[in-house]
Amino acid sequence: MRVFRGLPASADVPVALTIGNFDGVHRGHQAMLSRLVEAADDLALPPAVLVFDPPPREFFARDTAPPRLSSLRQKIEVFSTHGVARTYVARFDRRLASLAPETFIDDVLVRRLGARWLLVGEDFRFGKGRAGDLATLRGSARTFSVEEMRTVAIDGERASSTAVRMALSAGNLAHANALLGRSFLISGRVAHGTKLGRDLGFPTANIRLTRKPPLAGVFAVRVHGLSAAPQAGVASVGVRPTVSTSGVPLLEVFIFEFNETIYGRRVGVEFLHKLRDEERYADLDALTHQIRTDVAQARDYFNTTVDPKS
């Protein structure tokens, strides 16, 4: 798959295109990707996706924007597995935000991307003030056709990024993962920490989070990227109120039966089951006791529920 950072000055080939933020690339998004690839094959066009970075809601209100479910890298990886041939990553800035809907159609969709077939969700909005919608697209389309993607429901609920965030925030991983079609995962590079976990007898792999995560607490997890098979462990996501007052979130993972130096390695942490909420403890002895309990509960989960190597 080819990835284009920024919009080209002009299209080199016509494409079948879909547009969106694709946060989490949940089952609704996956249905869109499948329909895109199917139509592209019928029309003998490369299937392409247009995404925005940063997401528009972050551009307009970073402090109140919802937590991201996936990084741009994660999105692109999922696009590739679904057969997308091209991903265009458009920098969302004031110039792009100020484009009138008709200008966006003529300049971005037609001239720069060469759209010949376009798939959008039924609630798609675009252009300055979100003034453009499906009717605008159909009314202005001269060189491309427009198809509307209907809502995808999972267990009677609309598959949406908002629904996934609500499930993760509530600790309902089973529901979140049903909406996603896979386990929720956070990826990043292992960084040096304060070594407190090592001092307490539970050395952790620390993954710094650049944004507020969509979930918090202590979880049974699998860690991918360290060996051929994923490694079972227990993870804490939060601000560590017992040992820190910074308020900066951190992902810490204690990996069972693992004692290698992995600083700088990129890993993916797959969240399987929530054990408890994050709490503040009176002292390090109380915290250590709770960590032992967490580790025992996570081991019980893997022993009775899933194969930790699967």
Image (cartoon, helix red, strand yellow):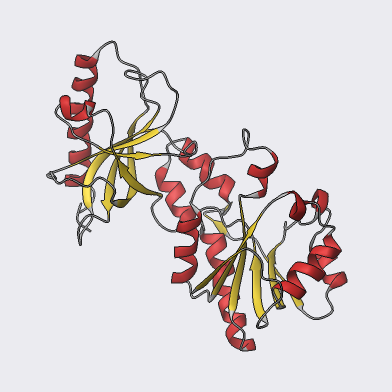
Residue 253 visible to the viewer: yes
Residue in the picture at 49% in, 38% down: 211
In the rendered view, would you say 147 is above or below 186? below
Q: Quadrant of the C terminus?
A: bottom left
Q: Position of residue 175 (x, y in %)?
A: 45, 47
Q: Is residue 273 left or right of residue 257?
A: right
In the rendered view, would you say 82 is above or below 234? below
Q: Is residue 261 left or right of residue 38?
A: left
The residue lying toward the viewer, choosing from 258 and 265, is: 265
In the rendered view, would you say 112 is above or below 283? below
The residue lying toward the viewer, choosing from 95 and 241, is: 95
Using the rendered view, name the quadrant where residue 91 is placed. Answer: bottom right
Q: Position of residue 24 (x, y in %)?
A: 51, 53
Question: From this viewpoint, which residue is outermost toward the top?
Answer: 282
Q: Position of residue 303 (x, y in %)?
A: 16, 46
Residue in the picture at 77% in, 79% down: 144
Residue in the picture at 46% in, 64% down: 78
Q: Position of residue 25 (x, y in %)?
A: 52, 58
The residue lying toward the viewer, choosing from 261 and 270, is: 261
Residue 135 visible to the viewer: no
Q: How many marks?
A: 0
In the rendered view, would you say 106 is above or below 62? below
Using the rendered view, name the quadrant where residue 201 is placed. Answer: top left
